[in-house]
Amino acid sequence: MRRREQREHVFKLLFMTEFNSTEEMPGQLSFYFEGMDELEEKDQDYIQEKYGQVLEHLPEIDALLEGTSKGWKTKRMNRVDLTALRLAVYELKFDGEVPVGVAINEAVELAKRFGGETSGSFVNGILGKIANGGEEAAAADAEDIKEPEEEIPAKKAFTHSEGKIVVVHKREER
């Protein structure tokens, strides 16, 4: 089974948690996996492990989502959008094996497939802010970097502006 398919199953299990109590979920998981023909044990193990890992980090994930999505508490979000966001934020922040672009793209695709008309753009916007927020934090730390000992060519210079490092292309004087 490909990662995309595994991710979709994790998404579906996470979505199920929105409508079932913690006590009901073990039984729901059993029903879910029993209904899947030709599921290899390694795939089921991967799906269950990732599902459990997302649930372990849910408080941190939801706090990040609420801090990023101005005016949108997780309780107000569409459940499909929220589930896609939770899975993607887990992959962005806690799963070092998934590249940023893949996590965002897969979440957007899940939101488009299972969500409403604007789900894809909503999910993309939130995840874009989260992904860029990480870069901005790294750039803010760049203030501690010393000036290079070698001279930067006249065509380029680096400047620090509001927590971001910006490459400035200077015109050569004639």
Image (cartoon, rainbow, N blue to C red):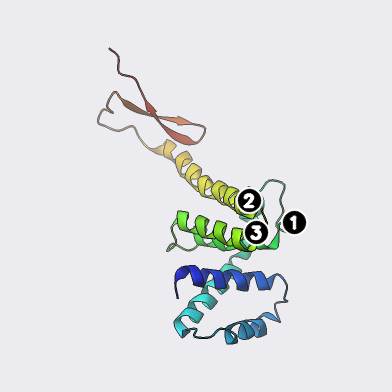
Of the two numbered discs 1 and 3 on the same chain, state the one appearing first in sequence.
1
Pointers 1 and 2 in contact (C-beta within 8 Å) = no
Q: Identify the residue at the far right of this view.
A: 76
14 lies above or below 136: below
Which residue, given by chain and number where applicable, does mark 1 sit on?
76
Marks 1,3: beta carbons within 8 A: no
Residue 136 percent location from the top left of the image: 50, 42
Q: Earlier in the sequence, mark 2 or mark 3?
A: 3
Neighbours of disc 3 within 10 Å: few (<14), some (14-19), many (20+): many
User: Disc 1 versus disc 2: distance between alpha carbons?
Assistant: 13 Å
Front position among marks 1 and 3: 3
Amino acid type, residue under disc 2 in the picture: Phe
Point 30% across, 18% down: residue: 172
Q: Is residue 41 left or right of residue 17?
A: left
Residue identifier under label 3: 81
- Element class at badge 2: helix
The reply to whether dot 2 and dot 3 touch (C-beta < 8 Å) is yes
Where does label 2 land, which residue?
A: 122
Image-based side of 111 in relation to 44, left or right: right
Q: Quadrant of residue 171?
A: top left
The local secondary structure at tag 1 comes to: loop
- Tell me if mark 1 has few (under 14), some (14-19) or many (20+) residues whose alpha carbon lies within 10 angstroms of its own: few
**Residues at marks 1 and 3, CA–CA distance in whole angstroms:** 11 Å
Q: Where does the image place residue 116, in percent across and percent down from the top left?
A: 68, 57
Q: Nearer the viewer, residue 58 or 4?
A: 4
Amino acid residing under circle 1: Arg
Q: Position of residue 135 (x, y in %)?
A: 47, 45
Identify the residue shown where x is 64% and y is 56%: 63
1 or 2: tag closer to the N-terminus: 1
